[in-house]
């Protein structure tokens, strides 16, 4: 099994190269008008003989809000195609071109131009919605269009006709999501890193789409096993592919501290030197962290840093014993038990430490969130825990960030905007419901549905089973809007799929646990509830297996999914002894 993945799918920021000519390219003054007409006619005839596009307009994952197929409107991308784009959307167009060039071999130049072309991306504050679309729909909720008549900050409209493809949105994020949809509507061979001889057909019709929830994310635990910057960038690409817009990085825990803090340098230098099983450890410099944030931002993914407090702090206590209740350094920890460590909640030095750390991390993080952890502080008395949590929340608030914490923070006093990340397995949680009544919002990460470190089946070679086995159907069949009693849908900010890494140590193993469950959670966060249907989802998801195989993405060939034959074998992670059951 490979231990080093290929580079992130868009790799380093691309330098555009354009050949001076390609087969079939029309050079200035060369063909006559009649010859050009004949060429176009021949191309159209070839398309008719080739049959319909191999992908259907409603094969997209996550399912779009509305789909209006037009079987007579298929478009075929040709070698002389160019992308035309509103100037503010040029970066999205450049990324789309970067995705399409390797497999097609086409130059696909990008031009700032308002007029239509074969591929057109348009930014418009008043982007059109379903009002201008046909009166038929492929979704099953019976509605006639977006309820408020607007696509919002992340919605888009995609129109495909025989003459071209147009993506329209009010924001670059919407254009980006529309471009990801277009990518899925091309044949699976579009994921090839080298040119492929294929008909690059896009099914005709209109897609009108926007997300159900504003927060859609996944979490990568880099504390138990450290993952290099390039590995994290590859995960960003996976999230963006399925319209997930937040990457939560679990940066600190008992086994390792992964972010440099200038005012407390030993946190990284000493606390970052270890990992589960005695691995090599590692940490991100300020420049490393900025690189991750910039890469994610270009893909419209917001990084959410987590500094887990007051528990899960053994690595910090090794570096700075004065933070420990007994002021004695514990030994480095490379196991997987939880709940034994905590910073001293009675010492003012602890709060100076928290203020410094969250202040520096907040200053490096342009996104609105800062995650405080707050879970499994089993040895901290309840009143001391509450006092610590309330002070720590205010310290985060003082940085200008919004507090996010695991749902154990619920009993603490409320601060404006506070978000609780719920990871329970029983939807009856009065404390969380009470916190919502006091103003908290909730991100849903139920451990028995959304924890991607759980095994798929008893024989899955890595992972846990303390929250149950999570196959693809279990990851898909739940509703974030009604999952926790007493938490109304309007209090749900969104969904997140955490991947804890006690038993996951390589990029290929990360991918094996993400796929195919990550797209299931992504659909719950993006698609209208009325579109959720297991049988239709498994059918749509099946077509993504060849895409992943072509792109070199490791995935679990779940027997629940009717995968088409794939020419590329799917590597599986090595088997290792089961780690102790635990939450995080």
Image (cartoon, rainbow, N blue to C red):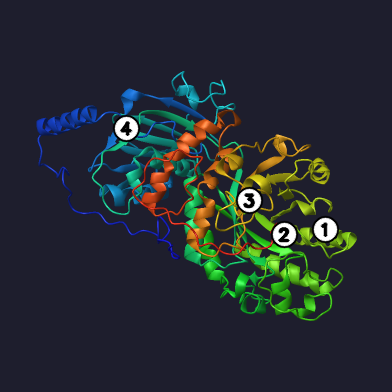
Farthest residue in the right direction? 383
- Marks 3 and 2 sit apart, C-alpha to C-alpha, by 19 Å
Spot occupied by residue 398 in the image (x, y as percentages of width and height) = 74, 60
For mark 3, does the 10 Å Cα neighbourhood hold few (<14), some (14 to 19), or many (20 or more) residues?
Answer: many
- Marks 1 and 4 sit apart, C-alpha to C-alpha, by 57 Å
Disc 3: which residue: 451
SS for tag 2?
Answer: strand
Farthest residue in the top direction? 135
SS for tag 4?
Answer: loop
Disc 4: which residue: 53
SS for tag 3?
Answer: loop
Comparing labels 3 and 2, the label whose residue is closer to the camera: 3
- Marks 3 and 1 sit apart, C-alpha to C-alpha, by 28 Å
- Marks 4 and 2 sit apart, C-alpha to C-alpha, by 48 Å
Comparing labels 3 and 1, the label whose residue is closer to the camera: 3
Of the image marks 3 and 1, the number of the one nearer the N terminus: 1
Spot occupied by residue 226 in the image (x, y as percentages of width and height) = 57, 68
Q: Are marks 3 and 4 in contact (CB under 8 Å)?
A: no
Residue 219, located in which quarter of the rendered image?
A: bottom right
Disc 2: which residue: 372
- Marks 3 and 4 sit apart, C-alpha to C-alpha, by 36 Å
Disc 1: which residue: 390
């Amino acid at each position: 099994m490979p231990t080093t993945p290929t580079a992130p799918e868009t790799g380093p920021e691309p330098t555009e190269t354009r050949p001076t000519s390609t087969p079939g390219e029309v050079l200035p003054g060369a063909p006559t008008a009649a010859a050009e007409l004949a060429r176009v006619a021949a191309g159209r005839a070839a398309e008719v003989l080739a049959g319909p596009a191999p992908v259907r307009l409603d094969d997209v994952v996550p399912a779009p809000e509305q789909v209006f197929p037009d079987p007579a409107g298929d478009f075929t991308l040709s070698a002389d195609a160019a992308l035309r784009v509103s100037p503010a959307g040029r970066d999205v167009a450049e990324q789309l071109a970067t995705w399409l060039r390797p497999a097609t071999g086409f130059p696909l130049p990008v031009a700032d131009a308002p007029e239509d072309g074969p591929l057109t991306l348009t930014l418009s504050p008043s982007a059109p919605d379903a009002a201008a679309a046909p009166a038929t729909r492929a979704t099953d909720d019976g509605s006639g269009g977006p309820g408020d008549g607007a696509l919002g900050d992340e919605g888009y409209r995609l129109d495909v006709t025989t003459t071209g493809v147009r993506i329209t949105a009010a924001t670059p994020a919407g254009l980006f999501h529309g471009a990801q949809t277009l990518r899925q509507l091309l044949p699976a061979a579009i994921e090839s890193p080298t040119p492929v001889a294929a008909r690059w057909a896009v099914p005709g019709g209109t897609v009108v789409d926007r997300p159900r929830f504003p927060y859609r994310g996944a979490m990568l635990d880099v504390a138990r096993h450290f993952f290099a910057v390039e590995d994290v960038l590859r995960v960003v690409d996976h999230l963006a592919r399925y319209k997930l817009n937040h990457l939560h990085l679990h940066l600190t825990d008992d086994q390792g501290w992964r972010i440099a803090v200038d005012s407390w340098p030993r946190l990284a230098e000493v606390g970052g030197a270890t990992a589960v099983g005695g691995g090599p450890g590692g940490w991100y410099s300020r420049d490393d962290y900025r690189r991750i944030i910039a890469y994610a931002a270009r893909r419209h993914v917001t990084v959410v840093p987590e500094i887990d407090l007051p528990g899960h702090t053994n690595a910090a206590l090794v570096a700075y014993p004065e933070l420990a209740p007994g002021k004695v350094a514990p030994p480095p920890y490379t196991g997987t038990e939880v709940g034994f460590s905590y910073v001293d909640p009675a010492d003012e030095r602890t709060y100076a430490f928290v203020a410094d750390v969250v202040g520096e991390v907040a200053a490096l993080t342009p996104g609105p969130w800062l995650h405080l952890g707050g879970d499994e502080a089993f040895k901290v008395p309840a009143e001391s825990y509450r006092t610590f949590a309330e002070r720590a929340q205010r310290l985060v608030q003082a940085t200008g960030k919004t507090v996010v914490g695991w749902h154990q923070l619920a009993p603490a006093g409320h601060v404006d905007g506070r978000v609780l990340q719920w990871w329970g397995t029983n939807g009856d949680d009065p404390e969380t419901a009470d916190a919502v009544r006091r103003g908290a919002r909730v991100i849903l990460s139920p451990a028995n549905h959304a924890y991607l470190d759980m095994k798929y089946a008893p024989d899955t070679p890595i992972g846990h089973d303390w929250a149950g086995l999570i196959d693809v159907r279990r990851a898909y069949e739940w509703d974030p809007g009604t999952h926790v009693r007493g938490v109304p849908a309007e209090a749900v900010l969104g969904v997140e799929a955490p991947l804890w890494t006690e038993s996951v140590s390589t990029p290929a193993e990360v991918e094996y646990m993400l796929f195919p469950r990550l797209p299931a959670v992504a659909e719950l966060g993006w698609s209208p509830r009325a579109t959720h249907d297991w049988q239709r989802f498994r059918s749509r998801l099946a077509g993504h297996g060849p895409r992943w195989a072509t792109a070199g993405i490791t995935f679990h060939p779940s027997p629940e999914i009717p995968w088409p034959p794939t020419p590329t074998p799917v590597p599986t992670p090595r088997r290792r002894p089961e780690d102790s059951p635990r939450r995080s």
